[in-house]
Amino acid sequence: MAITKICGIETEYGIVIRGVDESNPIAASSMLINAYLHETRKVEPAAAPDVGWDFEDESPGNDARGGPSPGAMAPEVETHLVNAVLTNGARYYVDHAHPELSTPECADARSVVVFDRAAEQILIESMDAAKRALPDGQEIVVYKNNSDGKGNSYGCHENYLMDRQLPFGRIVSHVTPHFITRQIFTGAGKVGSEAGGLNHVDVPFQLTQRADFFEEEVGLETTLKRPIVNTRDEPHCDATKYRRLHVIVGDANLSEVATFLKVGTTCIVLAMIEDDALPRDFIFNAPVWALRRVSYDLSLRAPLELVDGSTVTALEVQWELFDRARKYADSYGLECVGEAVGAEVLARWESVLTALETDPMSLADQLDWVAKYRLIEGYRDRHDLEWDDARLAAMDLQYHDLRPERSLFARLGMERITDDTEVMAARTEPPTDTRAYFRGKCLQRWADDIVAANWDSLVFDIGREPLRRVPMMEPSRGTEAHVGTLLADCTTAAELLDRLGS
Amino acid sequence: MAEREQIRKPAPAKKDAEEIDEAPATSEKGEKIKAELDDLLDEIDDVLETNAEEFVRSYVQKGGE
């Protein structure tokens, strides 16, 4: 049986410092995060623990195809920059030259949407805090997008817990068609192309931010020669039982429906791969070309060539995956992705595919690329502009501006699947149904006794030698159901450690 | 600015049946979205970056991931 699809999202945000002549994005990212931590600590000390990240288990150079990969450019682990762990179980840090926030581990796609929205709220509060700390006239502005329009890209990565027994090659062959074709609902939209050799007449507008930047089918890199399927093998849990599929091919979405579908459909497709419920393989003749072809094709009807010489469209592939998913749900159930949430994913998947087929523009209140296209095309039409007009590129960027008063996305009144109360709570409260609960609750209560935290352990210092590392190698354990009573019964961290056994 | 004023279409009042027939979107929902879009386009110049060219030019990021 497929294992529970614990999942999460890591987002690198674009960052701009306004009101200065020269800016350093690394310093600005640090300043942004530190301003948030500092202000939050003043108001609510327990919500922003002064606990550093523990790099003990970081090994991003390991390749899922077997061992460390000597020839590949493995990312370096940056240990000197600001790196905070939050009481909702998230990690908030500087990665390269961007502020990045990784959601806590979530048990289903809806929970990911809640914590992704909470992450946006944390970034918004960070901008406010930084503004108060900066001289008058200066401001740090954060964008939830993936490209600067000049060939520089930064990522929004998804993570999914997978069964280690499954051969990696099988994941690659079955998940690649989904990654190529899910773009029709996951795309965040982009004016023009950065792929080189294509102008605004060739590609006036495309479905995704990211397709321009992918050059390989499978690989370890994330910053150059980006692959459709990333092979980073760093499970952050029991590596004998699990792998973490690290997905780098997606866009950062502002639309809740798009995030929900992006994560929800992928969870179901991965569960079907684990249960061997996908008999037909769509093997594309040229996957990288197909990825871009889908992104550049607003008609959604472009034929994509398979190795057997036949062709399919992105919609056809998605319809077949959906049909399989519905049959899979009937025979296997959807417990591994959450029964209720899984049913919601199926219903939404079907309605969105139907609308994409008949009247894509009717999804302007649900999908990012449609909303952005409608807005920019409407403006272009009204002012009689060419697609290379700077005003359209500016609107593209401003769609992703996280400042509520400037965000074009925020003005569009898109459909919500979360509510403000749960999003605000998720800024500081962890999910109850993964190990993030144990991490978050311990940090809320005993931050002074915790010297470091990471995905799979907490390190306590309660004055006894040596330091005590509490491993959390099972992402589905450490939930409220599992440790809620234990935590409630303990007054001190020392008691907790005694109860856990020394 | 004067030029923009001339091009700007009048704010849409209630849509009449004829206009709905001409619209490219076919569904009722599509119509609602279109009306909302017109309203938004009427007011959007107030929030758009004032110097689009300079804003786009200066938005430069380092690659990430």
Image (cartoon, coloured by chain):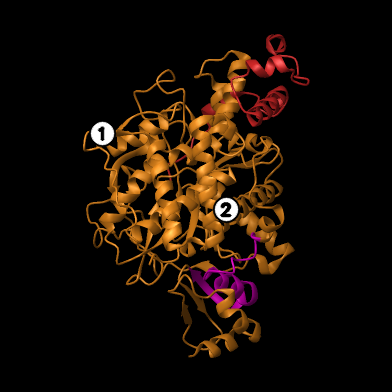
Q: Nearer the viewer, residue A137 or A319?
A: A319
Which chain, by letter, is red?
B
Q: Chain of mark 2?
A: A
Give the residue type that dot 1 points to. Ser
Q: Evaluate whether label 2 is on the same chain as label 1.
A: yes
Q: Is residue A428 above or below residue A141?
A: below
Which residue is identified by label 1?
A310
Residue plotted at (24% across, 37% down): A285
Q: Is residue A478 above or below residue A29?
A: below
Label 1: which secondary element: loop
Give the residue type that dot 2 points to. Val
Q: Nearer the viewer, residue A482 or A303?
A: A303
Q: Nearer the viewer, residue A457 or A111?
A: A111
Residue A61 horizontal side relative to residue A120, left or right:
left
Q: Which residues are magenta?
A: A426-454
Residue A327 horizontal side relative to residue B22, left or right:
left
Residue A417 horizontal side relative to residue A205, left or right:
right
Q: Which mark is residue A113?
A: 2
Q: Is residue B50 magenta?
A: no
- Quadrant of residue A286 in the image? top left
Residue plotted at (76% across, 18% down): B11
Name chain A's colour: orange
How far apart are the alpha carbons under marks 2 and 1?
37 Å
- Where is residue A440 shown, x and y percent of the image? 59, 70
The residue mark sitting in front, 2 or 1, is 1
Q: Is residue A155 above or below residue A492?
A: above
Label 2 Cα neighbours within 10 Å, binned few <14 / some 14-19 / many ≥20: many
